[in-house]
């Protein structure tokens, strides 16, 4: 399997998680807010890992969005703008899957979806720029 196919798998998985979160958010009350937030975190994680893969970095087996973001920032310092979103989404990697004292509200869920979309848009633009740059270099 080629690099572009593996990259597309990362992006497809990120898209699947975000679409799942959006779909679940349309459920009648009560919405599964914790599950939705988990999917938002997972979506962002997969986009960041796809970006790393595109740059020939094996994505680490971690759910820590801050760690992944720092790795992306070493490649493209503009990724630092995603820190506020990562700070929020980071908590949703593990906590929602187990009984805990963190209370996730419907407002939290809406913010998580909004932030996951911001991450999606930012990373897809960065990936598109990299691919276009690489193609231009190949054509010269």
Image (tube, rainbow, N blue to C red):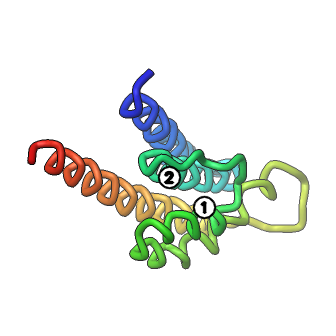
Q: Which mark is residue 23?
A: none
Other-residue count near label 1 (Cα within 10 Å), few / some / many at <14 / 14–19 / ≥20 = many
x, y percentage for residue 33? 66, 55
x, y percentage for residue 32? 67, 49
The answer to whether 40 is drawn above or below residue 76 in the figure is above
Assess whether mark 1 and mark 2 are in contact (beta carbons under 8 angstroms).
Answer: yes
* Residue at 50%, 64% in the rendered image: 72
| 83 or 57, nearer to the observer | 57
| 130 or 8, nearer to the observer | 130
Q: Secondary structure at mark 2?
A: helix
Q: Which residue is mark 1?
A: 68
Q: How many circles with numbers are drawn on the protein?
A: 2
Q: Which residue is mark 2?
A: 52
* Residue at 53%, 68% in the rendered image: 111
Picture quarter with the N terminus: top left
x, y percentage for residue 77? 43, 75
The answer to whether 44 is drawn above or below residue 53 in the figure is below
């Amino acid at each position: 399997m080629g690099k572009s196919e593996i990259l597309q798998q990362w992006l497809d998985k990120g898209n699947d998680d975000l679409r799942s979160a959006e779909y679940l958010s349309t459920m009648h009350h009560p919405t599964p807010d914790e599950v939705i937030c988990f999917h938002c975190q997972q979506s962002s994680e997969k986009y960041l890992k796809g970006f790393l893969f595109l740059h020939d970095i094996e994505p680490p087996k971690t759910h820590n969005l801050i760690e992944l973001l720092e790795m992306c920032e070493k490649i493209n310092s503009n990724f630092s703008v995603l820190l506020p979103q990562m700070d929020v989404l980071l908590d949703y990697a593990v906590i929602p899957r187990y009984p805990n004292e963190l209370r996730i509200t419907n407002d939290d869920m809406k913010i998580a979806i909004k932030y996951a979309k911001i991450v999606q848009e930012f990373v897809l633009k960065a990936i598109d720029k990299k691919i276009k740059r690489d193609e231009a270099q190949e054509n010269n």
